[in-house]
Image (spheres, grey):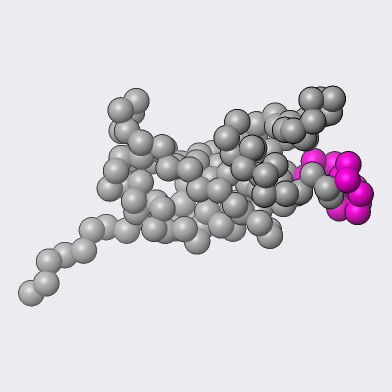
Amino acid sequence: SPPASPAVPQFPPYYETQYEEQMLDHFNGENVGTFRQRYLVNDTWFGGRSSPILFYCGAEGAGVPSIFEHSGYVLALAKELKALVVFGEMRFFGDSMPFGEDESFRPDPTHLGLLSVEQALADDAS
């Protein structure tokens, strides 16, 4: 008979919701505004300081909880590696709206102009 497959994490996965105070504009030193960016942390299998951290970025659309619940491969890898998992929510999605739900999508450079790949990557790096 074939060998038993490793146990797959049960869903929905457990996570802790946290927020990071993030710069509105990482590339304009005169814009000192900030917003709260949401991320989720799962430490179910975390082995401690010598274990890796898996960072999963994106979460466009409904936000990071819906992405987290459908990312079993990341959690399976975390179990195998004894890793901490961090799911970052992309700016302008879910709870990570820089100017609130009504104002964030105003079509001008000081609002929707701050939704870019460059800004999102700078969020993830900070």
Q: Is residue 7 left or right of residue 1?
A: right
Residue 7's spot in the image, x, y percent? Answer: 27, 57
Looking at the rendering, the stretch of residues picked out in magenta corresponds to: 97-111
| Front residue of this view, candidates 118 and 21 | 118
Q: Quadrant of residue 24?
A: top right
**Figure check: 19 above or below 80:** above
**Figure check: 75 above or below 123:** below
Residue 36's spot in the image, x, y percent? Answer: 72, 35
Q: Is residue 89 left or right of residue 46?
A: right
Q: Is residue 104 magenta?
A: yes
Residue 99's spot in the image, x, y percent? Answer: 85, 41
Q: Quadrant of residue 16?
A: top right
Q: Quadrant of the N terminus?
A: bottom left
Q: Residue at x 64, y 37 (%)?
A: 122
Q: Residue at x 47, y 46 (%)?
A: 14
Residue furthest to the bottom: 1
Q: Residue at x 70, y 42 (%)?
A: 119
Residue 101's spot in the image, x, y percent? Answer: 84, 50
Judged by its main secondary structure, the magenta piece is: loop
Q: Residue at x 55, y 48 (%)?
A: 57
| Front residue of this view, candidates 69 and 103 | 103
Q: Is residue 102 left or right of residue 23?
A: right
**Figure check: 82 above or below 69:** above
> Residue 80: in sight, yes or no?
yes
| Front residue of this view, candidates 124 and 20 | 124
